[in-house]
Every structure is written in C-alpha cells, then in structure tokens.
Amino acid sequence: MKFSSAFKFGALCVVGCLLSLNSALANSYEQIKKDGVIRIATEGVYSPFSFHNEKDELMGYDVEIARAVAKKLGVKPKFIEASWDAMLAAFDAGKADVVFNQVSINEDRKKKYDMSVPYTMPYPVIVVHKDNNDIKSFADLKGKKSVHSATSNWAAIAEKNGATVVVADGFSKGVELIISKRADDTINDNVTFFDYIKQRPNAPLKIAYTSNEPMPTAALLKKGNTELLEAINKALDELKAEGKISEISMKYFGKDISK
C-alpha cells in the first residue's frame, strides 16, 4: 500500500506530538508526586556546589538545597550526573525534572526555560595566571582565549566581550589550561575560585577582576511546567524563611551566599 507524502507528514507530526506530550507528562509535578521521585540534574564535579567526598558520596551546596526542596515536596531526590553540556542535553531530552547546578539567570535562558526564585547571589570574577597583568576588566578580554564549558553563561559573557572561547569541561579543567598558559582566562563566580584555591593554595592563579553586580542563580525547569515551578518556589521561600539555606551556606562557605 502506498501512502501520500501528506499522509506520511501527518503521521510524523502525530508521533512527534505524542513524544512531546509523553516528555511533558514525565516532567510534570503530577507524575513526580505519583512516582514519589524527582530527578535532579547536577554535575557532581563542581565543588563546592556539587561533588563527591572521599567516600564517593554526592554532596555540596546545591545538592543539599535540592534534597531539602525534595523533602518539602514529599518526594525522594534522584540525581542525574553529567558534565555541564551533557547535563543540559539530558535535561532537554526529559531525563531530569529540574537542574540544581548554579545556573545563572539570564534573558536567553528565561526565553527557553522557567527558572525558580534565586537561591545564590555569587559575584562574577575573571581568573588568570598569576603572571598575567594584561586583563583588568571584561573589556580586556577582547582577543584573548577564554576557557569555559561550551554553553555556559560565562562563555557567553566572554564572547560578548570579544574573547575566543576555548572549550573545557568544568572549572578545574579550565584553570589547568590557564596554568599551562594554553588559555588566558576564565570567568566564574568568586565562591568557586576561593574553594579551588583553598584546596590548591599553590596554584599560580589570581583574580584579575571582580564584578560589583551579583549574578543570581536558580533552579532550571522546562518551560510551562507551572505547577512544579510554583511548588519549588514555595519550597525555596520556606527554606529561606526557616534559615535552612543560610545554614547550608554557612556549612560550605562560612558565610551566607544566598543574600
């Protein structure tokens, strides 16, 4: 039996719609409550926010906040770990319900995703080799090699300021390129840098510039997943009011980075 191209196109559209519907249902708050599990995407190699301790247990600031949110929702957390770009690809494919991984809020992301209320207020910094005195502001990134995860917000800032982005998975891999002078700089938050230096005090790195403007971070959700977004926002607001987020922050940083 032969089918017309119009029929084939219509059939493909129906299949596509059904797949999209199934993906949406899989990420819905109703399905999460039914399953009793919320799938949380995180890197697992992004200390002190998401990493493994000496016992190979997943821990970190974002991990503990995600667990506290899951408890508020009355469900169990299931963590999906992957490098930044692979993690977002898995999330886009419906393999996770929410991302807790220091996702900066910006207009491009808000067009594609829904974002929760902020739970961290870090300050962007430019990190360079200790011998590098050429970079003192974002404007100085023009023509420089700036190392980042391919789709990170920091990479977008570097490109906006005229830098060429060198791709590396995560902050640690990026600064290795700076130390070996195969890249000039990286942009990240001040908390990540100070945690790295605390663990590697002899690393030949320094902060060349610190922004005066914080870059709030939030949980990332599928666009239009309103019921889940409202539930997560309510949980985060309650955790803030109860002092839980401040407590988690003090545990990892010795200060409250949520304000």
Image (tube, rainbow, N blue to C red):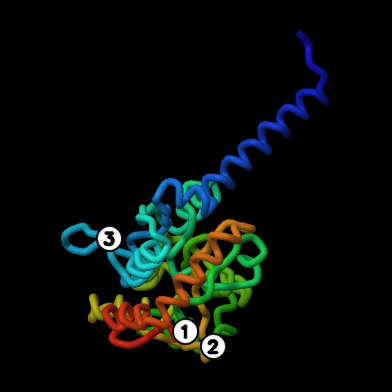
Question: Which residue position holds label 3?
Answer: 58
Q: What separation in Å lies between label 1 and label 3 (alpha carbons)?
A: 25 Å
Q: Are marks 3 and 2 in contact (CB under 8 Å)?
A: no
State whether residue 52 appears in this view: yes
- Amino acid tagged 3: Leu
Question: Which residue position holds label 2?
Answer: 213
- Is 199 drawn above or below residue 24 in the view shown? below
Which of discs 1 and 3 lies nearer the camera? The answer is 3
For the view shown, which residue lies furthest in the top direction? Answer: 1
The reply, left or right, for residue 182 in relation to residue 227 is left
What residue appears at the point 30 percent right and 78 percent down from the top-left corner? 195
Percent across and percent down for residue 254 are 28, 86
What residue appears at the point 39 percent right and 53 percent down from the top-left corner? 82
- Is 68 drawn above or below residue 77 in the view shown? below
Q: Mark number for residue 132?
A: none
The reply, left or right, for residue 102 in relation to residue 24 is left
The reply, left or right, for residue 246 in relation to residue 221 is left
For the view shown, which residue lies furthest in the left direction? Answer: 55
Q: Are marks 1 and 3 in contact (CB under 8 Å)?
A: no
> For the residue labelled by badge 2, is the local secondary structure a helix, a strand or a loop?
loop
- Amino acid tagged 1: Tyr
- Is 98 drawn above or below residue 21 in the view shown? below
- Amino acid tagged 2: Glu
Q: Are marks 2 and 1 in contact (CB under 8 Å)?
A: yes
Percent across and percent down for residue 176 are 34, 68
Q: Mark number for residue 123?
A: 1
What residue appears at the point 51 percent right and 88 percent down from the top-left corner? 211
- The quarter of the picture where residue 57 lies is bottom left
> For the residue labelled by badge 3, is the local secondary structure a helix, a strand or a loop?
strand
Crowding at mark 2 (Cα within 10 Å: few <14, some 14-19, many 20+): few
